[in-house]
Image (cartoon, rainbow, N blue to C red):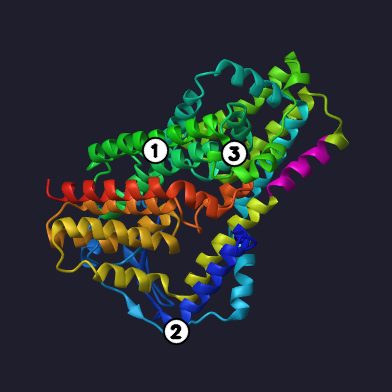
């Protein structure tokens, strides 16, 4: 048994894609009618099967369709994707996916994920360039010296800052860039790579799980539920602080054990491999003016990216452009020859090619579900499960349902617009506020995100060459603790 090796992330995702393909033969096909808003024509567009019709963009139209959302949520752009129309689910002719569809799904997923894949590859090139200058190595050495004896500050600082990004603007895919940068810092602080992964990934996961003003989850979900995003904000702030405290305590305790006895690391057998992957030559690097300028440009890339996403509504094209320009500027500042720059950039991008493929293959699972017309069917049956429940059971069940649905719909914004018009009215039937459903959506999606193979965890682990089984071993106690805590909070809040 010891010779049996846990499968790679790519293999895990292909197995999942195969199982989902089989699921399209077992789950009935079906679809809700959808309603979208055409800003140019100031009209609603209702799509039913292959039939498309326009409707006047009025509050009366929404009321007729049993959609309890203010008209201005559509006209001001808060809801910019078609939503499912309640009580319109219809079974359709089965669309089982065959072997040919299964083989095509990773390719389709890669094409659909081209924006984030190019972001990852360009970030890889940037990291290759900054590493070749030696600036990053010298910076790590100075930081490790400054934190000597107080390394726990690094855990707190990284986790809290990443969580702040997650709770405000959905800082998730962008964290891929930080693993090659920060893992060497954690290694220099005598932690193992798992501490670095946990600080970055769990910070993002808890931040997005307990989103406060995140437009891609809290605001869009609240809008689709027909309530103000400030409703339930106090509870989400409490959850953010509580879950962050629990996670930080867990990571710091694990990190101290590893510092005292490296054999306690869950990835102890990979210690030399990971150290070689993130090796640095700090003793031979002097901090020249050029290196300082290179690091400043490097840091500015991330500051500009965050500002652009938050204030300028940037997305992947703009973010990728920032990193590309940053790479070129660093090359000019460090006087890297043109041919050497190209070779180094391509090699850096190649180092993250496996990560990019994982992202594409994961998207392929969603493609199979969409083509097999089973996503709406799962939503329909999930919404039917809560009939007749009391308040406490409803809140906990809704959290669990959203956790399960997130496997099939990992996108937070996609989940919101597809499910909220269907799920939020269920709160009225059991006598709780619709913010309970919004919170259940966030907490269910966020908790399962810890271990969701169709999310970002496999791509994140691939950057550091850590197996999914090692991550599960590390995170499971924390995962179970947060599940129990969240369900207790949801049950109590449903009665308040």
- Identify the residue at horizontal 39%, vertical 42% (top origin): 206
Q: Give the left or right position of residue 347, taking residue 219 as reference.
A: right
For the residues labelled 3 and 2, the Cα–Cα distance comes to 43 Å
| Labels 2 and 1: the sequence-earlier one | 2
Image quadrant in which you'd find residue 81: bottom left
Up the image or down, 286 lies above or below 15; here it is: above
Residue at which label 2 appears: 94
State the predominant SS element of the stretch in magenta: helix
Q: Quadrant of the N terminus?
A: bottom right
Q: Give the left or right position of residue 174, taking residue 280 as reference.
A: left
Look at discs 3 and 1 and give the one toward the viewer.
1
Residue 247's tag is: 1
Q: Give the left or right position of residue 116, taking residue 420 as reference.
A: right
Q: Residues within 10 Å of mark 2 (few under 14, many from 20)?
A: some
Residue at which label 3 appears: 179
Look at discs 2 and 1 and give the one toward the viewer.
1
Up the image or down, 355 lies above or below 164; here it is: below
For the residues labelled 2 and 1, the Cα–Cα distance comes to 44 Å
Question: Which segment did they paint magenta?
Answer: 341-352
Foreground residue among 134 and 34: 134
- Residue 343: in magenta span: yes
Residues at circles 3 and 1 in contact by the CB criterion of under 8 Å: no
Judged from the image, the secondary structure of the residue bearing numbered disc 2 is loop
């Amino acid at each position: 048994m010891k010779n049996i090796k846990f499968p790679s992330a790519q293999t895990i995702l292909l197995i999942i894609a195969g199982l989902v393909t089989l699921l399209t033969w077992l789950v009935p096909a079906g679809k809700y009618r959808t309603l979208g808003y055409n800003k140019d024509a100031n009209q609603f567009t209702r799509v039913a099967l292959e039939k498309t019709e326009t409707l006047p963009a009025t509050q009366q139209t929404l009321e007729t369709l049993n959609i309890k959302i203010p008209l201005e949520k559509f006209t001001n752009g808060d809801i910019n994707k078609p939503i499912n129309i309640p009580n319109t689910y219809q079974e359709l002719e089965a669309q089982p996916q065959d072997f040919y569809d299964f083989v095509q799904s990773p390719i389709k997923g890669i094409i659909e994920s081209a924006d984030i894949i190019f972001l990852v590859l360009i970030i890889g090139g940037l990291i290759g360039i900054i590493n070749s200058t030696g600036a990053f190595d010298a910076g790590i050495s100075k930081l490790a010296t400054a934190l000597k004896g107080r390394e726990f500050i690094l855990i707190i600082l990284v986790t809290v800052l990443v969580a702040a990004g997650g709770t405000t603007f959905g800082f998730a895919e962008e964290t891929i860039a930080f693993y090659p940068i920060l893992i060497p810092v954690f290694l220099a602080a005598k932690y193992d790579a798992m501490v670095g992964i946990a600080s970055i990934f769990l910070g993002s996961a808890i931040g997005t799980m307990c989103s406060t003003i995140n437009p891609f989850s809290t605001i869009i979900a609240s809008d689709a539920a027909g309530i103000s995003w400030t409703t339930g904000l106090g509870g989400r702030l409490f959850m953010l602080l509580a879950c962050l405290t629990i996670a930080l305590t867990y990571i710091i305790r694990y990190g101290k054990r590893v510092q005292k006895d490296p054999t306690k690391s869950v990835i102890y057998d990979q210690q030399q491999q990971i150290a070689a992957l993130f090796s640095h030559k700090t003793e031979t690097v002097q901090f020249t003016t050029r290196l300082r300028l290179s690091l400043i440009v490097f840091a500015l890339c991330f500051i500009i990216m965050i500002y652009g996403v938050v204030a300028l509504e940037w997305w992947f094209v703009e973010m990728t452009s920032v990193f590309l320009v940053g790479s070129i500027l660093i090359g000019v500042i460090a006087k890297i020859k043109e041919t050497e720059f190209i070779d180094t950039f391509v090699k850096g991008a190649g180092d993250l090619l496996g990560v990019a493929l994982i992202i594409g293959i994961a998207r392929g699972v969603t493609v199979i579900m969409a083509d097999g017309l089973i996503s709406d069917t799962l939503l329909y049956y999930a919404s039917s499960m809560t009939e007749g429940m009391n308040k406490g059971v409803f809140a906990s069940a809704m959290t669990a349902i959203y956790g399960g649905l997130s496997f099939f719909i990992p996108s937070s914004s996609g989940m919101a617009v597809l499910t909220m018009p269907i799920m939020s009215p269920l709160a009225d039937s059991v006598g709780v506020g619709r913010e309970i459903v919004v919170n259940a959506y966030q907490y269910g999606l966020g908790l399962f995100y810890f271990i969701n193979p169709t999310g970002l965890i496999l791509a994140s682990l691939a950057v550091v060459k850590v197996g999914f089984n090692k991550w599960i071993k590390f995170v499971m106690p924390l995962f179970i603790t947060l599940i129990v805590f969240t369900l207790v909070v949801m049950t109590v809040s449903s009665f308040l």
